[in-house]
Image: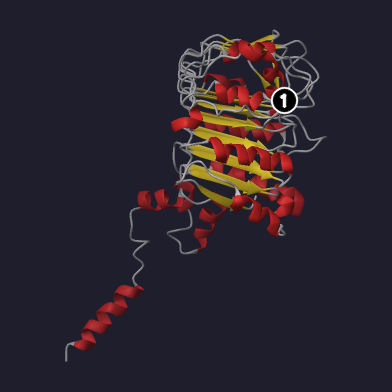
Amino acid sequence: MDSAPKIATIAKEEEEDRLSNLPSSVICHILSFMPTKYAARTSILSKMWKYLFLGVPRIDLQGTYQLIRPERSKDFFNFVNRRLMLGRTSSITEFRLICDVVPEPSKSNLWLTTLLLRNIHILDIDLWDEAGCPSLCPPNELFVSKTIQVLKLGGMNIVLKIPEFVCLPQLKVLHLKYLSVQSECSHFKFSQGYPLLEDLKLIYIRFPENAVLGILVATLKRIALTVGYCMEPVRVDIDTPNLQHIECSLQDDSRRVIQLNLVSCEFLVSAKFERSLLCESHWFLKLLCDFNKIKYLHLSALFLKDLGRCGDLLPTFPNLIHLQLTPSEDSMWILLQRSPILEELDCVMGGMIVSAPPESGPPCFTENLREIRIRGFEGDEDDFAVVRYFLEHAAALKRMIIVLASHLVEKCPVSILQSLLKLRRRSPKCEVELLGS
């Protein structure tokens, strides 16, 4: 008797649009987790939903309009204009634009000015532009924003004219890549105008000739610097007493020697260095002498090749627990001898000549080294010699991970597997894992 009303009640509840009954602020919050093009599609659901997406304080736009249909770029620009001008929220907290079309300078400046007036917090623009596209020059108002916290700009056609006065009191993250910078003088400084900056990344930035880059921010914790466009600075001065992580990559197309001066390394935890043959290594040796508290170190083969010649000049790393390197001559064995508490070794086999190892294992082999990863394993005699030495001398080793070179993944010779299984292991708890690349 009572089953029919219950069924009717359940059916009514199933037909009820509970999502639409939520407060508009809650719906906008849900839509903020979607890319903007998907949030905009909800406007066809009903009259109530028609303009809801305009109240979302986050704009996320990504597309490949130039590659698919060039004529769609105009529609895309018009959509961005409407979204910015007709938005129902007074503030836009995040704006992300990643696409392969470059707007006209007047449009881009209008967008940036509008975002700055609406208290933007996170600004991320990455344009996959081509030669011949118009140059974009962000307005000076960008450098005096009181609300921006994250600024990421990337694009070959972006020209950043840094004014003499910069005041970004809330900025914590600054990532610049593939763009040109200009200034009234040849000395570019990141200093007083960035009082809260913690993360700085400069990737392939085109500087004027003979430029000097100064990074003097007390709050900075992370720096990533990649140069190699023949328009890099001739000198980089880094004075950041709270620096914890640094990455420096001087690529093979670099044409000048870069002088890097790092004043303080007291709190440095991790460092990654790569360089080309055209760069000097004496400055890096000087840096290593100050890395007494570093825990994570990543060095390229070209660095190691030169550092191996330094012999007894290399310092000891009393706190180093993770080391990633590409072996070169005897440099790996020298570094291992100077890393007494090393726990993890990541060895990238890059085809470099590795000299014979010492008869006795390094100090870390006795009780600290727990894991070794061998990447790019070719299965030749040199690679086997390295693996054999590690297994026979590392007394505390628990894991040996061998990652095959790409050409061996599909057809790994059985002889390689058999040879690996036959290798003697000093540590009874050591497990050997064979993985594809």
Q: Quadrant of residue 272?
A: top right
- The amino acid type found where label 1 is placed reads Leu
Does residue 436 appear left or right of residue 130 in this picture?
left
Q: Is residue 96 left or right of residue 1?
A: right
Q: Nearer the viewer, residue 277 or 338?
A: 338
Q: How is the image coloured?
A: secondary structure
Q: 272 or 227, which is in the foreground?
A: 272
Above-or-below relation of 303 to 81: above
Q: Residue furthest left?
A: 1
Residue visible at 50% across and 52% down in the picture: 34
The residue at the far bottom in this view is 1
Q: Is residue 238 left or right of residue 266?
A: right
Residue 170, picture quadrant: top left
Within 10 angstroms of label 1, few (less than 14), some, or many (20 or more) residues? Answer: some
Q: Position of residue 320 (x, y in %)?
A: 49, 25
Asked if one can make out residue 72 in the rendered structure from this viewpoint, the answer is no
Residue 167 image point, x, y percent: 51, 16
* Nearer to the camera, 47 or 239: 239
Q: Is residue 373 visible?
A: yes
Q: Quadrant of the N terminus?
A: bottom left
- Image x and y of residue 111, in percent: 60, 35
Tell me what residue is drawn at x 69 percent, y 41 percent.
383
In the image, residue 246 above or below residue 91? above
In percent of width and height, residue 129 lies at 74, 38
**Closest to the observer, 15 or 60:** 60
* Mark 1 secondary-structure assignment: helix
What is the tally of numbered marks visible in this picture?
1
Residue depicted at 67% across the width and 18% down the height: 307
Q: Which residue is mark 1?
A: 302
